[in-house]
Image (cartoon, rainbow, N blue to C red):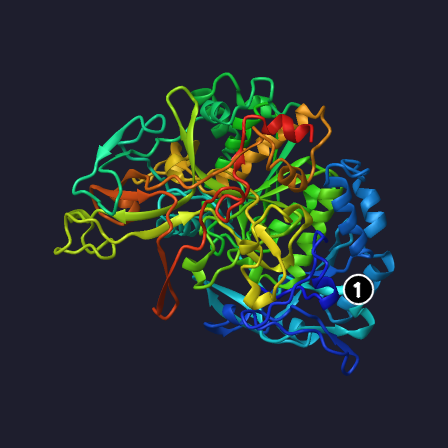
């Protein structure tokens, strides 16, 4: 689940390159490749980070099945990097002069001879050899754990990481010297578990709900290919139809410099409110553009749910105009491990928000078979076959910039370079846990968002007024204080008979993901825009070299200023039926932006804007293009949830929510040891660590189209 791509000192000096390879030492425990021994060559970056291996969780059965993708090196990686820069940088003679997928593969993919040699070696080791991808980057294979250990001269063991048990290699892998020149590693031997970046209540309650639903999924899998509906999150009153529609006088006073009267959360913004607040014109509809939504799993009711939702909430833009289609990789697997039903919330957010900001764009939903290896295969399917010009991904591997191995990142990065060079915009949610300190006790960006070849979409708290106008935006990071009431005594930590009636200590609830990469040098588009204090944040690990920072740009993500969605849910009475509720997270921000980019493609005359990062960093100083998100002082929201959301048997639970939270964050490991540290992300004038460049301005669509 981790590793690093290594760089040489000569490459480290070349900060103008879009991508260079970085060395991470003490934190990762990475090993460099050595000379070939006994006819074998070690593969750099294939041993897991020390931080991921702190909690062993038992052995891997030697007869256990291991599915993986052998990852091959591009024939001309430097040329592929140079092409990305040429076709995506305004002012370049090749700007937006894209290749076809076949042309890209002809120039950069591994050769047929390299593929043939790799397949022959896999077969000689007894693996079941599957398909070679059409881009020739990966070869599917399957075998036993014993075969993997022998073939790659490694060991396998289980470890507990972020509440999950994952299989990881115990030592660096190697391959015969005869094929080492064409092989990067094997993606999937080191497991990573992607999670959706959706936020409703608390991370703990949302995960518990999803896991409970997945237990039902296991029982139904034999007769129904789709997971059952997720457990319902039910929005409680008071909440407003727009920001500030209702307010609460805080009793007892919260103090700490916050106002005594604060706005209640919104009940959930509707499509028209987003179009109005983001200045999306009536003629900007994404017509003629296809947006692909990639998630794990799928729902048998998504089309009917979305049709019902728009009929109720946006009747002027019926869902039929999306010409919706699904490409599901059934049979689905690993449903319990992936909390499969929880991905159905994600699907509804993504599909319905894309249609909200691009009501005439076609939507292709691509449901991966699982959240482990399946998402890459789905991404590959869309990009290899040019099935869309915009791709939105509301998922990632928490702290994956540090933990994902070299094979995983190389396979994805090479695929993203192909997308960029063929005119496909690829977006990823930046994550919902800030710099991930609360999950791991260390700071790291998620991956794939940290790849310099994708647009990492962070989050804001968006204020939409009574007339659809944008009345303000703040960086999304929320501190939450529960009010201790009798119904949650001994249910909410810290709430006891002696604290009833008081506000409990503030804890970090969630926020826009972001941090500085450990692996990627600063891309040219970030030079002179990203402050050196952020680009050099990992100087103690990587040396005095500017590095890639994410997110790039942000849209609404705060779940308390979130989006009203419609889907089938399982309610507390056991009924499986359509319901409407509010969700947020950077899961919302990415598909909102995907619709906006579809609008820009349309405005550009149907010519895709492609990889947008070089263009949008150039728009940073253009008036009206990007709204800068700056500190807003001590602001807060009041939120009321049903008590059962947090495990209570009755009543409600109130929370006071500090906006743009910059207080302390606490991490507790598997043994109960805890550490506390201030939030490292904040808003500031210009590019900042919480929202990136900021959010889209009133002229963003036309300026991007015409850049």
Residue 8 in view (yes/no): no
Residue 645 in view (yes/no): yes
Which quadrant is the C terminus positioned in? top right
Q: How crowded is mark 1: few (under 14 residues within 10 Å), some or many (20 or more)?
A: some
Which quadrant is the N terminus positioned in? bottom right
Rendering coords of residue 508 (x, y %):
36, 52
Which residue is more in the foreground, 580 or 531? 531
Residue occupying image coordinates x 43% and y 22%:
468
- Please, is residue 46 above or below residue 195 in the view? below
Rendering coords of residue 608 (x, y %):
71, 32
Residue occupying image coordinates x 58% and y 31%:
625
Which residue is more in the foreground, 374 or 273? 273
- Please, is residue 517 above or below residue 367 in the view? below
Query: In the current view of this chain or complex, which residue is farthest to the right?
Result: 113
The count of marks equals: 1
Q: In this view, does 661 lie to the left or right of 317?
A: left
Which residue is more in the foreground, 686 or 243? 686
Rendering coords of residue 528 (x, y %):
63, 47
Which residue is more in the foreground, 225 or 553? 553
Q: Could you say which quadrant of the image residue 269 lies in?
A: top left
Query: In the current view of this chain or complex, which residue is farthest to the bottom?
Result: 38
Disc 1: which residue? 182
Residue occupying image coordinates x 48% and y 18%:
315
Rendering coords of residue 148 (x, y %):
66, 71
- Please, is residue 164 above or below residue 563 in the view? below
Check disc 1 and report its element: helix, strand or loop.
Answer: loop
């Amino acid at each position: 689940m981790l590793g690093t791509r290594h760089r040489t000192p000569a490459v480290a000096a070349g900060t103008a390159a879009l991508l260079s390879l970085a060395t991470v030492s003490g934190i990762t425990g990475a090993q460099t490749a050595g000379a070939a021994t006994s006819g074998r060559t070690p593969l750099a970056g294939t041993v897991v980070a020390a931080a991921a291996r702190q909690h062993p969780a038992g052995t891997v059965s030697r007869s256990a099945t291991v599915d993986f993708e052998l990852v091959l090196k591009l024939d001309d990686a430097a040329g592929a990097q140079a092409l990305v820069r040429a076709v995506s940088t305004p002012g370049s003679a090749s700007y937006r002069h894209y290749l076809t997928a076949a042309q890209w593969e002809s120039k950069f993919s591994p050769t047929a001879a390299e593929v043939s040699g790799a397949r022959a070696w896999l077969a000689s080791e007894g693996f079941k050899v599957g398909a070679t991808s059409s881009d020739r980057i990966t070869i599917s294979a399957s075998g036993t754990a014993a075969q993997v250990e022998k073939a790659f001269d490694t060991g396998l063991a289980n470890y507990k990481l972020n509440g999950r048990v994952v299989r990881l290699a115990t030592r660096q892998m190697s391959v015969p010297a005869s094929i080492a020149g064409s092989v990067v590693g094997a993606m999937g031997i080191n497991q990573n578990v992607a999670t959706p970046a959706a936020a409703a209540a608390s991370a703990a309650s949302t995960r518990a709900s999803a896991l409970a639903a997945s237990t039902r999924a296991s029982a139904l899998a034999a007769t129904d290919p789709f997971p059952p509906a997720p457990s319902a999150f039910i929005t409680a009153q008071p909440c407003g139809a727009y920001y500030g529609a209702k307010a609460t006088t805080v009793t007892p006073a919260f103090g700490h410099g916050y106002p005594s009267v604060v706005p209640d959360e919104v009940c959930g913004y509707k499509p028209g409110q987003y179009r109005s607040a983001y200045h999306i014109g009536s003629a900007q509809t994404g017509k003629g553009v296809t947006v692909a939504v990639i998630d794990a799993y799928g729902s048998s009711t998504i089309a009917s749910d979305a049709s019902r939702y728009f009929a109720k909430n946006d009747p002027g833009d019926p869902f039929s105009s999306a010409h919706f289609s699904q490409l599901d990789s059934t049979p689905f697997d690993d449903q319990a491990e992936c909390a499969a039903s929880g991905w159905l919330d994600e699907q509804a957010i993504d599909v319905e928000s894309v249609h909200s900001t691009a009501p005439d764009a076609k939507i292709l939903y691509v449901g991966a078979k699982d959240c482990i290896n399946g998402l890459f295969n789905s991404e590959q399917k869309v990009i290899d076959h040019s099935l869309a010009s915009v791709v939105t991904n509301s998922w990632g591997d928490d702290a994956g910039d540090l933990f994902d191995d070299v094979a995983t990142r190389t396979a994805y990065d090479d695929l993203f370079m192909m997308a960029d060079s063929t005119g496909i915009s690829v977006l990823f949610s930046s994550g919902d846990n800030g710099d991930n300190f609360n999950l791991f006790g260390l700071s790291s960006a998620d991956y794939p968002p940290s790849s310099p070849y994708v647009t990492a979409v962070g989050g804001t708290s968006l204020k939409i007024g009574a007339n659809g106008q944008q009345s303000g935006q703040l960086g999304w990071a929320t501190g939450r204080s529960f009010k201790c009431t009798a119904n949650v005594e001994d249910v909410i930590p810290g709430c006891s008979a002696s604290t009833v009636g008081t506000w409990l200590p503030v804890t970090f609830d969630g926020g826009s993901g972001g941090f500085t990469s450990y692996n990627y040098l600063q891309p040219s588009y970030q030079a002179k825009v990203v402050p050196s204090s952020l680009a050099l944040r990992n100087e103690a690990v990587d040396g005095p070299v500017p590095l890639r920072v994410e997110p790039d740009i942000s849209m609404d993500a705060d779940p308390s200023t979130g989006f009203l969605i419609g889907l089938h849910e399982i309610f507390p009475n056991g009924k499986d039926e359509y319901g409407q509720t509010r969700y947020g997270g950077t899961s919302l921000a990415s598909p909102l932006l995907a619709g906006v980019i579809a609008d820009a493609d349309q405005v550009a005359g149907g010519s895709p804007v492609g990889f947008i990062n070089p263009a949008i960093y150039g728009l940073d100083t253009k008036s009206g293009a990007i709204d800068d998100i700056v500190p807003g002082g001590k602001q807060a929201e009041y939120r009321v949830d049903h008590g059962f959301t947090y495990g209570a048997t009755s009543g409600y639970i109130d929370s006071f929510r500090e906006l743009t939270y910059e207080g302390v964050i606490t991490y507790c490991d598997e043994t109960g040891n805890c550490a506390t540290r201030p939030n490292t992300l904040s808003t500031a004038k210009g590019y900042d660590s919480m929202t990136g460049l900021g959010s889209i301005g009133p002229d963003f669509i036309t300026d991007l189209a015409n850049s």
